[in-house]
Amino acid sequence: MRDWVWLRKVRMGNKFVRAIFPGSFDPITNGHLDVVKRAMRLFDELIIAVGRSPIKNQLFTPQERVEMIAELITDLPGVMVESFEGLTVEYAARRKADVILRGLRSLTDVSYEFQLAMTNRAVAGVETVFIMTSEQYGFTSSTLIREIASLGGDLSNLIPANVHKRLEGRFSKLKHKVEDSMQG
Ligand code: ADP
């Protein structure tokens, strides 16, 4: 840990560095958390920013996603969570963030993330920092988690226990609704 603090000081001087980590987090996975924990070594403050996108088809409400994340970061100093609406770059400016943090899983992520980072820099001059996930989370995506959970698969290695519990609750509720509508 000490080496990381030293590295940050060398790279960024003694300046306080605030990063935002924007995303859908629907739901948060161990892959996201892995990126957060690595990022803590580089930044003084990290805000996990849950996007309230009106376009995306979401399983959990922004408030539910924020609640799940809040339960997971209680022992991570300097890490916060909130939701935001609108453009990420505008949110970054409101929060006076120095950088945007994004996670990378594979080469497939790179082309989209590269485009996004270039656009954000072109329109708002904001830099993006990428952190690569651990190998074991290279295939974990929230979309896949939602799909596997809906089919009752075992996800215990890929998501935190509190998220697992909420997913179980959500899908058993959905199951009941379908059964009710078939009977009614
Ligand atoms: P978005 O809809 O903005 O891509 P996500 O919640 O899917 O939101 O992802 C937020 C960020 O986390 C993105 O940079 C994404 O590449 C990254 N990410 C997603 N899953 C993982 C994972 N398993 N490991 C590392 N980074 C991840």
Image: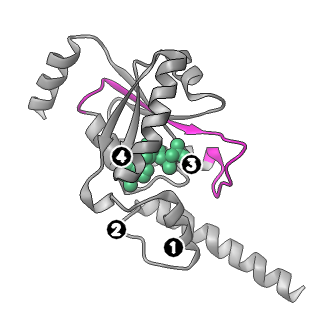
Residue at 63% across / 45% down in the picture?
A: 62
Q: Is residue 79 left or right of residue 40?
A: right
Quadrant placement of the C terminus: bottom right
Residue at 30% across / 26% down in the picture?
A: 43
Locate residue 146: give its quadrant: bottom right
Which three-letter amino acid code belongs to the residue tagged 4? Leu
**125 or 165: which is nearer to us?**
125
**43 or 102: which is nearer to us?**
102
Mark 2 CB near ligand 1 (8 Å cut): no
Tell me which numbered mark, 4 or 1, is placed earlier along the sequence. Answer: 4
The verdict on residue 54 being magenta is yes
Dominant SS in magenta: loop
Which three-letter amino acid code belongs to the residue tagged 2? Asn
Tell me which numbered mark, 2 or 1, is placed earlier along the sequence. Answer: 1
Residue bearing mark 1: 148
In space, the residues marked 2 and 3 are separated at their CA atoms by 19 Å
Residue 157's disc is 2
